[in-house]
Image: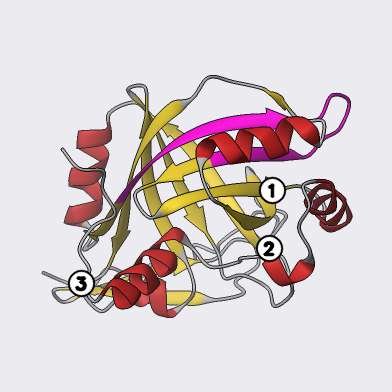
Amino acid sequence: MPFLARPERLELPTYWFEASRSIHLSYGRATIAIIQSCMTASGVHRETEIKLPVGSAAAGRRLLRKAGFRAAGRRCFEDNVVFDTPQTALRRAGCLLRLRTVRRRSVLTFKGPAAPGRHKSRDEIETPVADASALQAILQRLGFSPVFRYQKYRTEFAMPGQEGLATLDETPIGCFIEVEGSPAWIDRAAAALGFTETDYITASYGRLYLDFCARQGVPPGHMLFPQ
C-alpha cells in the first residue's frame, strides 16, 4: 500500500484550525496525521469538569436536591467504547476517541489533552453517528481498535436558571457526581454539594478503573456491569 499523502498545492485552510499538535498513527505502510483542532474549528467545545465521589446513587441524589439541583432528564444506560492505535498513540498524547451509545443513539467524541489545573479542561468535538457498526468498521480500517469498554447509568441534573450541569454516574466501580461548567461555577456547585477542592477528581473513568483493579488485586479488563 502506498503512503497516504496530501496532494500537491493543496493547503489546509488556516481559518479551520491551527496545527497545534500532530499525532502520527501507523497502519501498515500508511501514515495518517490527525491534527488537533483549536477553538476556531467548527463544533469544538471547551469541556471543564470534575468528578466527586459519593457513597451511593441515593446519597448522590440527596446531595444534589439539597444543593438546589433538579433532574433534567431520565436515568439512561450508556455503553462506551474507547479506540486507539496498537501503539496507544492517542492515550500517550492525552487524547480520547470514544463511541458512546445511549438508547440506540450513538455519538463519536474526540477529546484533546487536558490543561493543567484543579479542574479537567480540554477541547471536545462531538458528532452524532447514524450507524455505529459502520463507524467502528471505518475506524478499524484506519488502524484504530477498541481498547477499553465501560458502562454506566447517568442522570442529568441542573440548577434552574444556571448554565452548569451535574450528572450522577452509577458505574461498576462506584458512584460519582460530575460537575461541568465554568471553573467558578464548578467551585460554587461543589461547595453547595458539601465538597472541597481536595475532593476533586480529574482522572478519567479508565484511570479510575485501573486504580480500582490495583486496589482489589484483580487483573483489569473492561468496566462492565455483571450480566
Q: Magenta part mainly helix, strand or loop?
A: strand
Q: Which residue is mark 1?
A: 179
* Amino acid type, callout 1: Val
Residue 157 lies within the magenta run = yes
Task: Say which residue appears at 39% left-offset and 73% top-offset.
Answer: 211
Q: Earlier in the sequence, mark 1 or mark 2?
A: 2
Q: State the image coordinates of residue 88 (x, y, percent, origin top left).
A: 30, 75
Quadrant of the rendered structure where residue 199 is? bottom right
Task: Say which residue appears at 73% left-offset and 72% top-offset.
Answer: 198
The answer to whether residue 8 of the structure is visible from this angle is no
Q: Earlier in the sequence, mark 1 or mark 3?
A: 1
Task: Say which residue appears at 82% left-offset and 58% top-offset.
Answer: 183
Residue 193 lies within the magenta run = no
Q: Which residue is mark 2?
A: 121
Q: Name the secondary structure under disc 3.
A: loop
Residue 135 marker:
none
Highlighted range, magenta? 150-168
Say if 40 sits above or below 156 in the image. below
Q: Earlier in the sequence, mark 2 or mark 3?
A: 2
Q: Which residue is mark 3?
A: 218
Q: State the image coordinates of residue 222 (x, y, percent, origin top left).
A: 23, 57
The crowding category of the residue bearing disc 3, from other C-alpha atoms within 10 Å (few below 14, some 14 to 19, many at least 20), is few
The answer to whether residue 97 of the structure is visible from this angle is yes
Question: Which numbered mark, 1 or 3, is in the foreground of this view?
Answer: 3
How many labels sit on residues? 3
Q: State the image coordinates of residue 111 (x, y, percent, origin top left).
A: 53, 58
